[in-house]
Image: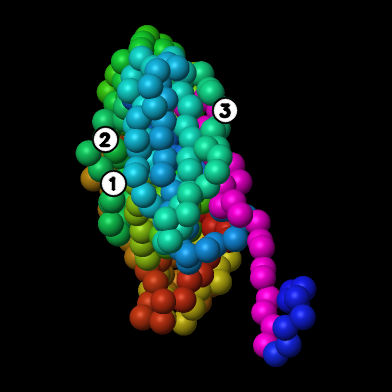
């Protein structure tokens, strides 16, 4: 702005900006839960900062009563407040000020919301890390809900549901998180997270996490039930379609007296590699004739994995 009088010489500027630093908005959950902490979020002021850093004063109101101070002065735009259990309504408001003492002209108040008084389920489990494991895990736990709500409890590994069930009357009783053999086989080596989640259907959801590292470097395959035959088996031939690294160790044992109290296992690994028939040395003592095998593979020093596709063959 230039002088309006007749004086000459230096001139000056006068700048007038937006003279408010009111917070843009104050927000928090639309249905907060009594007895729990909630976050009050303040949207940044959009006006001019006359003195550098903007600080916020945050207050809250319970059941339409007097305003209580959550924090007198903070530069953070998120403030946590504990809503007492039994509270019916909640509201929060904020004002802003800068380093010069300039204060926003308007107190920005968020919406008054109804409080849900629902206790979230509690998961009692003493395990949070299983470390490195090679076998399917088994973890004991129980879930309770002080409101007596029926809960849906879900067990997962890496987000994939292993089991889901309903627990009425606010109690699951003693439970065991134990994936099946098939579920374990489809879990690859490496780091994983198992979770137990309890949902009371009223907004109360609790999750307990269990970390583990699957480290399986040996596999073993056998028949769950021996193959019964009408007569004693005298010889066999076995073919194994496989893709195993050179440093992997594997062996195949067979028995022709699988129903005996103590079957005798004969190592035919080299015969399988060469494609030869095997003649059994053992005789049957139980009166029942049966065949079975045990294939074992162990990963070598290279750490390279492999697989067995099929096991086939014949006997007489």
Marks 1 and 2 close (CB-CB < 8 Å): yes
What residue lies at 42% left-to-right and 61% top-to-bottom? 99
**Residue bearing the label numbered 1:** 128
Quarter the N terminus occupies:
bottom right
Which numbered dot is residue 179? none
Image point (30%, 59%), residue name: 132
Q: Nearer the viewer, mark 3 or mark 1?
A: 3
Would you place residue 207 above or below residue 112 in this image?
below
Q: Nearer the viewer, residue 276 or 160?
A: 160
Outermost residue toward the bottom in this view:
9
Q: Is residue 183 magenta?
A: no
Mark 2 lies on residue: 125
Q: Residues within 10 Å of mark 1 (few under 14, many from 20)?
A: some
Question: Which one is nearer the viewer's eye here, 91 or 302?
Answer: 91
Q: Which residue is mark 3?
A: 111
Residue 15 within the segment the image draws in magenta = yes
**Residue 206, placed above or below residue 98:** above
**Which quadrant would residue 145 be assigned to in this image?**
top left
The percent coordinates of residue 42 (x first, y second) are 52, 46
Label 2: state its secondary structure.
loop
Q: Position of residue 115 (x, y in %)?
A: 46, 20
CB under 8 Å between discs 3 and 1: no
Instruction: Identify the mark nearer the N-term, 3 or 2.
Output: 3
In space, the residues marked 1 and 2 are separated at their CA atoms by: 8 Å
Range covered by the magenta-colored residues: 10-34
Asked whether 93 or 289 is in front, the reply is 93
């Amino acid at each position: 702005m230039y002088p309006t009088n007749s004086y000459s010489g230096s001139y000056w500027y006068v700048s007038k900006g937006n003279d408010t630093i009111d917070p843009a908005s104050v927000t928090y959950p639309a249905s907060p839960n009594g007895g729990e902490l909630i976050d009050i979020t303040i949207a940044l002021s959009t006006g001019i900062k006359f003195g550098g850093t903007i600080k916020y004063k945050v207050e809250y109101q319970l059941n339409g009563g007097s305003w209580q101070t959550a924090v007198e002065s903070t530069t953070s735009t998120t403030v946590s407040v504990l809503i007492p259990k039994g509270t019916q309504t909640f509201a929060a408001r904020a004002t802003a000020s800068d380093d010069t003492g300039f204060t926003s002209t308007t107190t920005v108040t968020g919406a008054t919301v109804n409080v849900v008084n629902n206790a979230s389920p509690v998961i009692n489990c003493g395990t949070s890390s299983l470390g490195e494991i090679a076998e399917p895990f088994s973890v004991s736990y129980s879930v309770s809900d002080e409101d007596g709500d029926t809960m849906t409890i879900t067990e997962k590994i890496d987000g994939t549901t292993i089991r889901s069930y309903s627990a009425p009357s606010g109690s699951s009783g003693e439970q065991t998180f134990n994936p099946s053999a098939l579920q374990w086989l489809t879990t690859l080596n490496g780091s994983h997270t198992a979770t137990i989640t309890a949902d009371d259907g009223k907004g109360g959801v609790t999750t307990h996490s269990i970390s583990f590292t699957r480290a399986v470097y040996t596999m073993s395959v056998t028949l769950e039930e021996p193959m019964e035959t009408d007569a004693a088996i005298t010889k066999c031939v076995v073919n194994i379609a496989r893709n195993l690294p050179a440093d992997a160790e594997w062996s195949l044992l067979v028995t022709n007296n699988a129903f005996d109290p103590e079957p005798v296992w004969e190592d035919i690994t080299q015969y399988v590699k060469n494609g030869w028939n095997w003649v059994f040395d053992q005789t049957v003592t139980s009166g029942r004739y049966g065949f079975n095998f045990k294939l074992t593979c162990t990963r070598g020093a290279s750490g390279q994995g492999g697989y067995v596709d099929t096991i086939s063959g014949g006997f007489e």
